Amino acid sequence: MAQSSLPTRFPDAQKIKKEIKNQWLEKKQRKRKKRKMTMNGDAPEEYEYDRAKEVKEFDESKIGCKGLVDSGATTIPRFFIQPNPQSFIKPSPPSSSHLIPTIDLSHALSHRRSEIIHQIRHASHTWGFFQVIHHDIPISVLDDTISAVRSFNELPTEIKSQHYHREMGSSVNFQTNFDLYRSSAATWRDTLQVRLGPDPPVVDRIPDACRRELMEWDGTCGGWERC
C-alpha cells in the first residue's frame, strides 16, 4: 500500500508551534519590561508616557524638588529629564571680551540716574542678568537674607505647601519652575518669590521663616518692630 504524506507547501506543525511560542515569549517580555519601567529616561518609544498627567500630579502635590528628596524618592520624575541630551550644543570657551555687565549704583540718586537706568535696561535686554556694586546693602543683611530663605526651604513640606501656588500677580508665591507646564524639561529648582515693589508687600503673606530678613532687605518698614 502506498503511503501518503502532507504536501510540502504545508509548514511543519512543530515549526508553527515554535514560532507561536516565541511570539508569546516576546510579548511577555515586553509587558514585563514596561512593568519595571521607572522614570529614569530609559523608557522605549512604545512606552505610553503621559507627561501632562505626571506634571499636574506633581504640581498639585505642592512638595517641590526638596519635597521629593525628603520623601525618599530614588528616581527622578521623567519630566525633569531632557528629551535628547545628545543634541545639546556644548558652550564655547569663555572669552575675556565677554564680561558680565556691572552696574555701579553709587550715583543712582544723582544726575546720572537716567544713565544708570539705561545701563540696567541694556544689560537686562542683552544678557538677562548683571552684577550690582556700591548698592549700600550691608553684607550682614545679604548673609541674613540668604540664610533666612534657606531656612524656609528647609521647612517641612506641609508648611511650605501653604505658600505653593501659581496665581499671577500675587505678592508672595512658592513654586517649582514658573514654566513647568510649557518647558520641554523641568529644572531641579524651587523658587520663593516675594515682590517688594512697586506696591509694598502684604507682610502677613511673607513666610515667618524669612519675614524679618526680607523686610529688613526691603527697608520699607524700618525694622520688624514697626511692621
Image: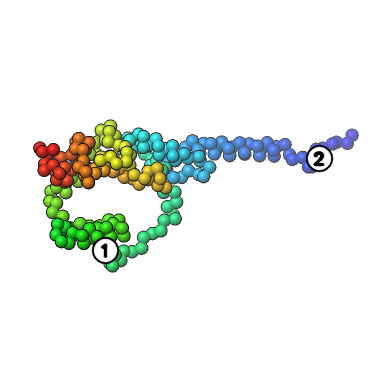
Decide: is 56 above or below 121. above
Q: Is residue 30 visible?
A: yes
Q: Considering depth in this image, is 88 or 142 the residue closer to the camera?
A: 142
Q: How crowded is mark 2: few (under 14 residues within 10 Å), some or many (20 or more)?
A: few
Q: Residue 99 carries which label?
A: 1
Q: What residue is disc 2 on?
A: 7
**Image spot of residue 163 (x, y percent):** 27, 36
Quadrant of the image occupied by residue 30: top right
Q: Tell me the kind of residue under disc 1.
A: Leu
Q: In this view, does 75 lie to the left or right of 23?
A: left
Question: Which sits in the foreground, 190 or 40?
Answer: 190
Q: Is 166 left or right of 115, judged from the image as shown?
A: right
x 14%, y 57%: residue: 109
* Image label count: 2
Q: Residue furthest right?
A: 1
The residue under the point 16% across, 57% down is: 108
Quarter of the image containing the C terminus? top left
Q: Can residue 81 be seen in this view?
A: no
Tell me which amino acid carries mark 2.
Pro
Write the residue at 42% across / 42% down: 78
Foreground residue, 78 or 209? 209
